[in-house]
Each structure stands twice: as C-alpha cells, then as structure tokens.
Image (spheres, rainbow, N blue to C red):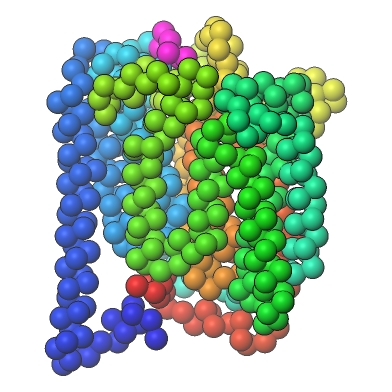
C-alpha cells in the first residue's frame, strides 16, 4: 500500500499516524502559502515597483490580474503533487506570456521590437480577449469535471500496452530518420550557433514546409520510440528484452540530444524533448517527484529560459540584463500579446476568411503546387498585414481563433480546449503511474501545448500529427484479461493514489 493509500485509510485513533498525516497536510499548506505569496503577490508587487508606468494604457491592470490568477492556479497545481500537466503548462504560459511580459511591456512602453506600432487603444480590448479565452478555458474544465461527477467520464480505463514489435520497427525507422537529419546538418549540430544551425537547415531543405516536416521527422518519431521502449522494459519479464530495451532507449536519448541540443535548437523544442525524457525517467512517478519537477519547470521558465540565448548566438556573450524584468522589455520572444492585438485589428477590419487558417493548418501536408491559395503561416500573414519586415512571429491560440472567425471562435476554441485538457489530464495522471501507451502521451503532449499556445498552428501541426501517428503506431492491443481492468474501479480523484 502506498503512503497516500495509508493516509486515506488512517485510523483516527492511531496518534502516530494521525500526527504524520497532519504534518503532511501542514507542510503542503505552508508550501501553498509561500508559493502564492511569491507568484501571486511578490512578483506582481516587485514588477510594479521596478517598472515605471509611462501611461501607455491601463491594460496592465488586467494583465496584472492574470499574473495573480495564474500564479494561484500554478501554486495549487505544483503543491498538490498531482501531475495534471496539460493544466499546468497552460497556466504557466498564461502566467509568463500573457501576464508578466505584457504587464512589463505596457507599463514601460517598450513593446516587442518585432511588432512595432501597435495602437495603444487596442491594449485593453486585447487584454479582455485574453481574459475571455482564460475564462472559457476554466468553463470547459468545469464542464468536464461536472461530467466526471455524473459518472459519465471515467478517470482511467484498462492499461493500453505498447506493441513490442511495432516499437522495434518504429525505433529502427526513427533511427534512420534521425541519422539522415544529422548527416545533412553536419557539424553545426555539435558546435554551431543557433544562426548557423538555422542556416544549415535552410540550405539542406530550402522549402520551409518541407524543412519543418523533415526536421520534425528526425525528432518526434524517436521521442515516441524511446517512450515505447521504456514501457517495453517496464512490462517485459524477459531479462534480455529488458536490457535490450534499456540500451535502445539510451541510444535514442543520445541521438535526440544531438539533434535537439540546447545550443542550436529552438528552446521550446529542446524543452519538450528534455521534459519528455525526464518523465520517462520517472520525474513525476510520485507526488514528491512531481512537486519538484513542476517547481523546477516554473523556475526554469522564469530564470533559465530568458537567459538561454546567451550561449546560443554568435554574439551571445553580450548579456546586458540589469534586472529581473528588463529581459521582458522590447524582447521579440514575448511578442504573443501584440500578435493577439494585430489579430484583433485584422478581425475588426473585416479581413477574416472564416476557418481559412485552420484549414491551412489541418491540410499542412498538401503541397502549394496543388493548392496555390493555401494560407500562409498566421504569424507571417499578420506580419504582412502590418507591413513588418520581420515575419518569423508567433501566433498565439487567441490570435489563431480571431483570424478564423473572431471572438465567437475564441469562446468555442477555449471551451473545447478546457474540456480536452481536463479529459486528457484524467487519463494521463493515472497512466504516468500505471504505464502503457497513455504514459507516452503524458510525457510529450502536455509540454508540447506551450508550442501550440504560442503558435503558430501551421508550424506546430506537422510535428503534432507526426507524434500522434507514431503513438498510434506503437499502441498495442487492449488487455484481454481482468488483470488490465484494475483502474476501472478506481474512485473519482484516484489520481491521489500517486505514491508520496
């Protein structure tokens, strides 16, 4: 019986056990208070004191409220120790990219240098649109929670194992694809800067769509294969098979780190792969580990992510950061809020072709030779609309919704997203403990949502579809015996069965 199980069945008359239980709850309460004090009170207060308001607009009040809101939600998530990872990464994105960054930029007037000239009159409507999406996300979660309580959604079904022979096939195919990508990129993979790596990819595959798909094919099949090998090792009773699976998984992890290293690859891609490998290694297997992992991710996004470019660029040695919030001022990495403003302006001017951008993302695989009017990347489209010379811009989910139909699509998309995130969290929380193919989903897709949230969809869709296809490929047959039905009787909230 796990520690959490023992806590759930503790005898009120057993003083030692009762004190132990109270101590655990007391520690969690203290951690929660400290976390809220830092994330929802301390950091917002420090921002107000550190960044002078130049009176660009009053929208910073709304984005400041988002910091407080998201900080509280993050605190409850990591302190609980239950790895609801889709929810966790959503609130982490909101906290930084829709909270801290726009608040600092609006107060200082130093907006992202790649999205100049945004009308200050759009600031408050843009902040309102962001809040609308967040509220709808919460509504979607509540809808699914209500469905769970009515007994119409189960926490977990039978463990769906991986297919060993399909895993072997995927690993060999992924090894060939990764080897091809490594051979074309050459030494820039090992010792170049980010610019050199980007130039090498452009030289190897001039067409952007082909370049994105080929590069993704060297990464995501392998990360799925490594996860499947870990599950194979976990379930195999044959010592030789277990050793072979372990060796193959380690080889795959090394290959991934060669392609997706922290110097030459995009930080979001590196973070996705690094987090997945950490989960495979058991980073969220118990409540204690899950707490430490989620806390480390928050710390990484706040302190490591902003400084990562110092070692990734040819001029990376010149780091001029003079304060915590100066990283966010004028920084092109935090253009998400302003791209939502541009998308809102695009919709207000009546330029939207309903669902056109979504169609381009879903049909990313159709060559432009067969579809001459195929929509371009939403970030590029908004850059062209605004007349920007630089077009490698983000297109957050809010912006994607606006350019596909306006505010009503924002409402629909985020309600669906909230429902889906809760439904997926219910499945993966149990799977991360019990294993099976859903454990692979839980390792990769939650952190991948940060790429989807930042956008654009067209850039992320190919990798997402490739990942899902590989997961479906390694999915084994459902268990035929009652042995695999252990979770069917699990009570609601059974995620708490994670070991302490």
Q: Residue furthest bottom?
A: 13
Q: Quadrant of residue 45?
A: top left
Q: In the picture, residue 341 is in which quadrant?
A: top left
Query: Residue 429 at x, y = what percent?
Result: 47, 65
Q: Residue 261's x, y, as percent? A: 57, 39
Residue 210 lies in magenta, yes or no? no
The main secondary structure of the magenta stretch is loop
Residue beneath the point at 39% across and 74% down:
499
The residue lying toward the viewer, choosing from 142 and 440, is 440
Residue 464 can be seen in this image: no
Query: Horizontal and vertical percent for residue 67?
Result: 27, 37
Q: On the picture, is 404 further left or further right than 221?
A: left
Instruction: Indicate whether 149 appears above or below 198.
Output: below
- Residue at left offset 80%, top offset 52%: 173
Q: Is residue 51 visible?
A: yes
185 relative to 429, above or below: above
Q: Residue at x 26, y 48 (%)?
A: 72
Q: Is residue 424 toward the left or the right of residue 365 in the image?
A: left
Q: Which residues are magenta?
A: 113-118
Say which residue appears at 21% left-offset and 36% top-offset.
43
Position above or below: 281 against 374: below
Tell me if 356 is positioned left or right of 420 in this view. Answer: right
Residue 84, position as x, y percentages in the image: 42, 58
Viewport quadrant of the N terminus: bottom left
């Amino acid at each position: 019986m796990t520690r959490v199980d023992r806590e759930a069945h503790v005898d009120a008359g057993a003083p030692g056990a009762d004190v132990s239980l109270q101590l655990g709850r007391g520690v969690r309460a203290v951690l929660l208070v400290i976390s809220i004090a830092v994330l929802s009170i301390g950091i917002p207060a420090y921002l107000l004191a550190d960044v002078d308001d130049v009176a660009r607009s009053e929208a910073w009040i709304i984005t400041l409220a988002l910091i407080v809101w998201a900080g509280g939600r993050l605190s409850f998530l990591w302190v609980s120790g239950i790895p609801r990872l889709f929810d966790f990464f959503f609130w982490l994105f909101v906290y930084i990219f829709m909270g801290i960054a726009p608040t600092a930029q609006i107060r200082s007037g130093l907006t992202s240098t790649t999205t100049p000239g945004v009308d200050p009159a759009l600031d408050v409507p843009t902040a309102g649109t962001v809040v609308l999406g967040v509220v709808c996300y919460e509504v979607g979660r509540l809808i699914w929670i209500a469905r769970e309580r009515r007994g119409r959604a189960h926490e977990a079904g039978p463990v769906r194992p991986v297919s060993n022979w399909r895993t072997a096939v995927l690993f060999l195919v992924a090894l060939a694809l990764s080897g091809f990508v490594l051979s074309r990129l050459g030494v820039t993979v090992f010792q170049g800067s980010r610019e050199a790596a980007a130039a090498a990819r452009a030289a190897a595959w001039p067409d952007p769509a082909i370049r994105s798909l080929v590069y993704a094919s060297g990464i995501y099949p392998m990360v799925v294969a490594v996860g499947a090998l870990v599950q194979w090792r976990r379930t195999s009773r044959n010592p030789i098979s277990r050793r072979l699976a372990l060796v193959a998984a380690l080889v795959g992890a090394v290959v991934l780190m060669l392609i997706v290293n922290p110097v030459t690859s995009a930080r979001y891609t590196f973070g996705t792969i690094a987090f997945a490998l950490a989960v495979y290694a058991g980073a969220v297997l118990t409540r204690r580990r899950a707490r430490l992992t989620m806390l480390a991710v928050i710390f990484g996004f706040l302190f490591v992510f902003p400084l990562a470019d110092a070692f990734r660029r040819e001029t990376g040695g010149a780091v001029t950061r003079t304060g915590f919030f100066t990283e966010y001022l004028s920084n092109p990495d935090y253009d998400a809020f302003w791209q939502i403003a541009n998308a809102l302006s695009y919709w207000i001017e009546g330029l939207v072709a309903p669902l056109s951008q979504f169609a381009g993302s879903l049909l990313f695989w159709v060559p432009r030779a067969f579809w001459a009017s195929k929509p371009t990347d939403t970030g590029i489209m908004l850059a062209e609309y605004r007349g920007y010379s630089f077009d490698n811009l983000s297109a957050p989910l809010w912006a994607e919704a606006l350019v596909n139909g306006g505010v009503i699509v924002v409402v629909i998309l985020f309600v669906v997203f909230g429902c889906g995130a809760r439904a997926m969290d219910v499945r993966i929380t149990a799977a991360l403990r019990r294993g099976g193919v859903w454990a692979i989903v839980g390792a990769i897709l939650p952190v991948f949502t940060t790429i989807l949230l930042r956008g654009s969809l067209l850039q992320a869709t190919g990798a997402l579809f490739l990942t899902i296809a590989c997961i479906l490929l390694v999915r084994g047959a459902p268990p035929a015996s009652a042995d695999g039905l252990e979770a069917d009787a699990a009570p609601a909230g059974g995620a708490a069965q994670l070991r302490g």
